[in-house]
Structures are given as structure tokens and as C-alpha cells.
Amino acid sequence: MKDKSNAIHIAKSLNKNFTVKDYVLPTEKKYKYDIIVGNPPYVEYNKLSIRPKTGYGNIYADVLQNSVKELKKSGVIGFVIPLSFVATSRMSPIRNFMYDYMQKMFVINYADRPDCLFDGVHQKLTILFGVKGQGKCEIFSSSYYHWYRDERQDLLNSCQVYPCIPQKQYIPKIGNASEYSIFQKIRNAEGISLLDIKNLAVDDSCKIYLNMRACFWMKAFSFNPGSKEYKEMVCPQKMQSYILAILNSSLFFMYWTIVSDCWHITSKELAEFIVPTQDIDLKKFILLSERLEKQLEKTKQFIGSKQTQYEYKHKECKIEIDEIDNALQKVYRLTNDELSFIKEYKLKYRMSYGAI
């Protein structure tokens, strides 16, 4: 009974001091708040008759900016916003604005598969908390969370954050020491980026076909599978199988999840993934890539849609992909624990183990 009485008292105090405001455009009345929370609309400028002058492109960013300006020093902000805030180059301006005004930020990142935060709305989301203040902004990030419906009740209680160093084009979705260590080993390896690998192809070039959209599996082939979603990548012929193996690996999947919008593969994701080129057993990767493509052909399903004739089942090739990651352990100087982490990364959801 006492708890109920306290709850009623708290509710009355909150209601008395609660204000609802529209922050899409700057407000004329300047009033400072202790706490600002919201779930702003996610609307592109091209759908508006009156567009904000900031040029962010989506009004959720304007709501963030205008809210922060009316927040007291040491005030707290809490918003549910699209994952693009942490994941896309386009949102660099609003991220930079937040770094200048906030002394601490926490970004907790959620997928839209297999379940989503809002019922019936498939939207990849970030829950953002921030404390306003001066000085260098400390940023803490979570991993990228997937969950099944029956795991929803523990979703918020089980989240973890880890100190994060923001990059120019994104905030890495890193939530633990293992992700951080592996991420750093990929970026600090001695070699050439996946984006620049084409520069090594002069007289002996060949092509790789990479699906530029992904969810739980990366899909790259030595031939065009017959879908417009695949883009040609040029590489030296002797490195084709090696690059194919990397692109299909769980290692690259983990890196892509940390860096990307978790839907597209762009030059941003390819530019910082470093491919070591010295002392690599290329013959081993020829065998591994051939074995994977053979199993993919064996397990593919005919669907005959306008987009493609066959659906390739990479989750039916987990053994072959694990062998690739085993070979990449030496290349990227991964520990045994890091290798295990990569092979088990998001496995419950990648393999649909919890699906009803």
C-alpha cells in the first residue's frame, strides 16, 4: 500500500512539471528543462512542405538539436531514434553537434529482426541517453541487439555498454572487450582495404560479385547469381578466392554489423576493413572458397522470382564458413577466444535457433 501511495505521489509531481513541445522547428520561447524525452517522427525533408534550414535530411535530427538547446546544464535527454544516428555518414553533422553539447552519451542499438521494439513496425533503432555539459564528450555504446519475442521482457535489463571512440562516419556498435579487440585488429592490420583492392588488379584482374544488402549472412560469389543486388568488385586473379573467403566470413559479418546501417554494404564498410597481403597461404583459400561455393550450389532453393532464380542458403554452409574463419585466425592474429567469439557471433539468430 505504501508503494502504491509513493507511486501516486511521484506521478502527480511528474504531471505537474510535465510539458509537451514540438521541437521540429526552433521555438521562440526559451525555457530550460532538466529532462527532455521523446520519440520524434522519422520523416524525410522531401515529404515536408516547410523544411528546416539545418539540412539534416530527416526531422528527428532537428528535434534532437532543438531539444538539446533547451536543456539545462547537466540536464538529461532520452530519445528513441533511427539507427542511422550512429551508422550513417549522412548523420555526421548531428552527431558532431551532440558531441559539442553533451558531456556523456549512451547509445543502445536494436535490430528489427527477428523481433522489433515497436510492434508491427520494422525499424532499426537506437535508444539515446545524454547528459549536457562542456568538455570532451564520453560515449558508451552497446552491441547490436537481436532478440526473439519471448526474450523481450529482459531486453533492457540485459543490455551492456562499453566505452567507445566515435569515428568520422559512424559510432561503432561495440558493447564489449571482445568486439573492441577484434575490430581494432581488423583496422590496424598491415595490408590494403577491401575498397582499394581493385588497385592491385592490373594485368590479371577478375571479378567478385557481392550482394550489397545483408541481414544475417554476407553473400559473395565468383559468378553473378542473377540478381541486381550484386555489385562487381575487381581484384587480382590470384587473390580472388582469398577475398571471397573474407567477404563470406563471420569475421566480416561481425565487422559489418559494427560499422554499417545493418542493411546496406557501402564504401564506408569496405574502406576500413584491411586485407593483409603478405605471407598468406592463398592455395588454402582456393580450397575453402571452392568448398563453400560447392555447398551453396548443393543447398540452394529455386524460387523463380523477378529478382532472382535461386536463393542461396548460407546458414546451411556454417561448417564451411567456420573453416574460413579458422584460416583467418592466423591472418588477423586472433586469439582462440576471439575466434570462438566470431564463430558464435549472433549465432542464435543467424541460424534461427529460437524461431517458432
Image (tube, rainbow, N blue to C red):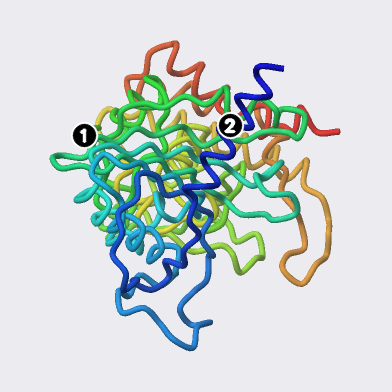
Q: Which residue is mark 2?
A: 9
Q: Earlier in the sequence, mark 2 or mark 1?
A: 2
Q: Quadrant of the C terminus?
A: top right
Label 2: few (<14), some (14–19) or many (≥20) C-alpha neighbours in 10 Å: few
Q: Residue at x 40, y 82 (%)?
A: 51
Q: Quadrant of the N terminus?
A: top right
Mark 1 lies on a secondary structure that is: loop
Looking at the rendered image, the disc whose residue lies closer to the viewer, 2 or 1, is 2
Q: Which residue is mark 1?
A: 190
Q: Residue at x 50, y 83 (%)?
A: 48
Q: Residue at x 65, y 65 (%)?
A: 227
Name the amino acid, label 1: Glu
Q: Position of residue 297 (x, y in %)?
A: 73, 45
Name the amino acid, label 2: His
Left or right of 100, for residue 322:
right
In the picture as drawn, the residue positioned furthest to the top comes out as 336
